Amino acid sequence: MSYPIQDIILKQTLPITKPARRFGLKHWLACALLLAGSNDILAGNVDVPTSMTTTAPFASRQAALAALPPLMLWVWERPDDVRTWLNSNDITAKAAESPAKSIPSLQDQRIGIAVLDTTVMLRDGVANVRRRQQPLQLPAAWYSKTGLQHKAPVVPIVHIDLARGKHKPALNEKQKKTIVGAVLAAAARSPSQVVQLDFEVMHSQKPFLADVVRSTRAALPANVALSITALASWCVGDAWLSDLPADEVVPMAFRMAGDTPHMRNILEEDGRFPRPECQPSLGLSLDEQPWPGKLRSQRLYLFNREAWSATPMASWSVRLGSLLP
């Protein structure tokens, strides 16, 4: 059975314990209209948050983040089916055999997904928002009658794409507010109470990224965790990330260009990057081998240039098993 992305994430409304500061119900509805499409909402195809006071599964963002599995698959913008990978987890497989039973707790899950939910394109002084268009298949046991079950290990990603050359973005206040709104809307759809911001910037653009992260954290509910990706170079010597109120920093130890030999040596020697904020999690790519011989991060995010459905889990199970805590 195919589960379009609208069924995977759009219909999952996150109950939260505290409204975001300065952002009321009207703002949430506006974000939903912007990102989901007003026609879908008017037609009744999308569940819009109607209550911001329902008790949340996790009382704190620290608890939500700690409950994520040790292996997270990055799922990008393509039709995909991750059930083979997710069902390779013995506990998940047992749940899939008995759809009537609830999914295992996140503490028992070994594999989850971080899925591209929204792309924000910054060009000149404008920010254009595009929701995911491609379907994704997940285990049926992860669903209830109303959508993804609370605590299902699914993290929506908001990716920021910057135009280059003569159309490079102005990085103005309007663009910042659009990004913050996109992250808030994705967070409202997150069954895991975790949302990830993927935003790579040049050195001169770091202040804008820092402002976005601070504004986003201030606007998010207190019990929703904010994860951000980071260039590997940001995690070596440069302390600017330590001042950002992100709950998780995921250094991407791949596509490192000229820094590759130096960064690989660091990981080989210590198993993680030196900056403390970059140590709990790490991002690797399937197509960049060999991986470091020892890794000390508690959570591994895995990038795949190909579809996960086209990548046999059996060929990676032993290698991944040796890396996971």
Image: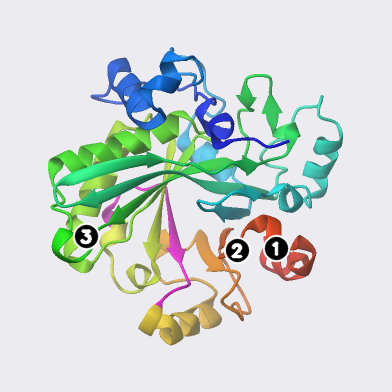
Residue 255 lies in the magenta-colored region: yes
Q: Residue 325: name its quadrant.
A: bottom right
- Figure quadrant of the N terminus: top right
Looking at the image, which is closer to me, 258 or 221? 258
Q: Which mark is residue 311?
A: 1
Mark 3 secondary-structure assignment: helix
In the displayed structure image, the side of residue 293 where residue 200 appears, left or right: left
Q: Which residues are magenta?
A: 243-256
Q: Nearer the viewer, mark 3 or mark 2?
A: 2
Mark 2 secondary-structure assignment: loop
The reply to whether residue 160 is in sight is: yes
Query: Three-letter amino acid code at disc 1?
Result: Thr
Residue 196 lies in the magenta-colored region: no
In the displayed structure image, the side of residue 230 where residue 289 appears, left or right: right
* Contact (Cβ within 8 Å) of mark 1 with mark 2: yes
Query: Three-letter amino acid code at disc 3?
Result: Lys
Q: Report how far apart the C-alphas of labels 3 and 1 lie in the structure.
A: 35 Å
User: Where residue 167 sits: x, y (%)?
Assistant: 16, 59
Q: Is residue 56 above or below residue 291?
A: above
Near mark 1 (Cα within 10 A), the count class, few <14, some 14-19 or many ≥20, is some
Q: Which residue is mark 2?
A: 306
Residue sitting at x 76%, y 64%: 317
Which mark is first along the chain, 2 or 3? 3
Q: Which mark is residue 206?
A: 3
Q: Nearer the viewer, mark 3 or mark 1?
A: 1
Q: Report how far apart the C-alphas of labels 1 and 2 lie in the structure.
A: 7 Å
Residue sitting at x 17%, y 54%: 169
User: Where residue 24 sits: x, y (%)?
Assistant: 29, 18
* Contact (Cβ within 8 Å) of mark 3 with mark 2: no
Q: Is residue 212 above or below residue 269?
A: above
Which mark is first along the chain, 1 or 3? 3
Query: Three-letter amino acid code at disc 2?
Result: Glu
